[in-house]
Image: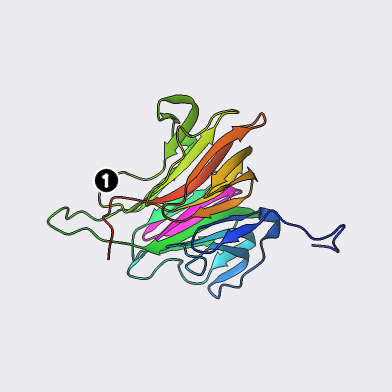
Amino acid sequence: MSYPKDLLSSRAVVKPGLWAVLPGDGLVNNVIPYIKGCRVSIVASPKMGAGFVQYVVEAGTNGHTVSPFAAEAEVEGFLYVIRGELKVTAGEQTVTLTEGGYVYSPAGTGISFVNQSGSECKFLLYKQVYIPLEEKISAKSPEIIIGNVNEIEYRIYEEMDNVLIKDLLPTELEYDMNMHILAFKPGGCHPIVETHVQEHGAYVLSGEGMYYLDDRWMGIKEEDFLWFGPYVAQCAYGVGTELFAYIYSKDCNRDVVF
């Protein structure tokens, strides 16, 4: 950082309990005791109304965890590499993830990481409380998932060939969350203004778009983070010449809990 060159301004908007847009250039560092050598920004938490916690992390050389992330008995976790290289351990599995690589850890498993690449690595962390299924519905439990989005083919979204989607996690009932990448070609858009019970946390990976949240259109671009809660009206379309793509979380496969 340096002295400001003009009047302070921001595109950030936070509507507690409803929605938020956090530009990447406005994020600050949060000290997390078990994460060392990293710049960590908490971009979503119950303090804003989210049902999960999400972080944007920049790991310096030898940035690492002292103890596992999302290791609590009832908490599931997810890590996604935006750029760089990261050695990651989930349970008994250790893998080196590169750009687009990800790992899902079931409740009680946890994720450890260390940056041994010699250069900075930027990635997302996510955790939420897992809601188990009744055993009479399914006795299966989620498993550790390791993958890379570059090895997953896009499929056409809602019969529109200018909007594409990737599913990062299995869709079986034992999983109560998923991660997707949604991508809009220039001019591509949602087929409707969506209003649904699911909440989303979305990080923009590339391009620019216009996003409608509740009652307001917002210009959105790469490195922005968006959160919107249940029943917030939302839709988007891509602008410019580059693919407007973002990775987003979704709660799924469960009934409403009173």
Relative to 188, is 59 above or below?
A: below
Residue 58 appears in view: yes
Horizontally, residue 54 falls left or right of residue 110, namely right
- The residue shown at (66%, 28%) is 241
Residue 132: x percent and y percent?
25, 61
Residue 99: x percent and y percent?
56, 44
Horizontally, residue 151 falls left or right of residue 62, namely left
* Secondary structure of residue under mark 1: loop
- The residue shown at (47%, 65%) is 49
Colouring method of the image: rainbow
Read off the magenta span: 76-93
Relative to 234, is 12 above or below?
A: below
Q: In which quarter of the image is residue 35?
A: bottom right
Q: In which quarter of the image is residue 118?
A: bottom right
- The residue shown at (20%, 53%) is 140
Horizontally, residue 251 falls left or right of residue 240, namely left
Residue farthest toward the bottom in the current orientation of the protein = 33
- Asked if residue 196 lies in the magenta stretch, the reply is no
Amino acid type, callout 1: Glu
Residue farthest toward the left in the current orientation of the protein = 136
Give the overall secondary structure of the magenta segment: strand
Relative to 253, is 73 above or below?
A: below
Residue 98 appears in view: no
Residue 209: x percent and y percent?
61, 38
* Mark 1 nearby-residue class (10 Å; few <14, some 14–19, many ≥20): few
Q: Which image quadrant: the N terminus?
A: bottom right
The answer to which of 16 and 43 lies nearer the viewer is 16
- Asked if residue 79 lies in the magenta stretch, the reply is yes
Residue 218: x percent and y percent?
62, 46
Residue on which the image places disc 1: 172
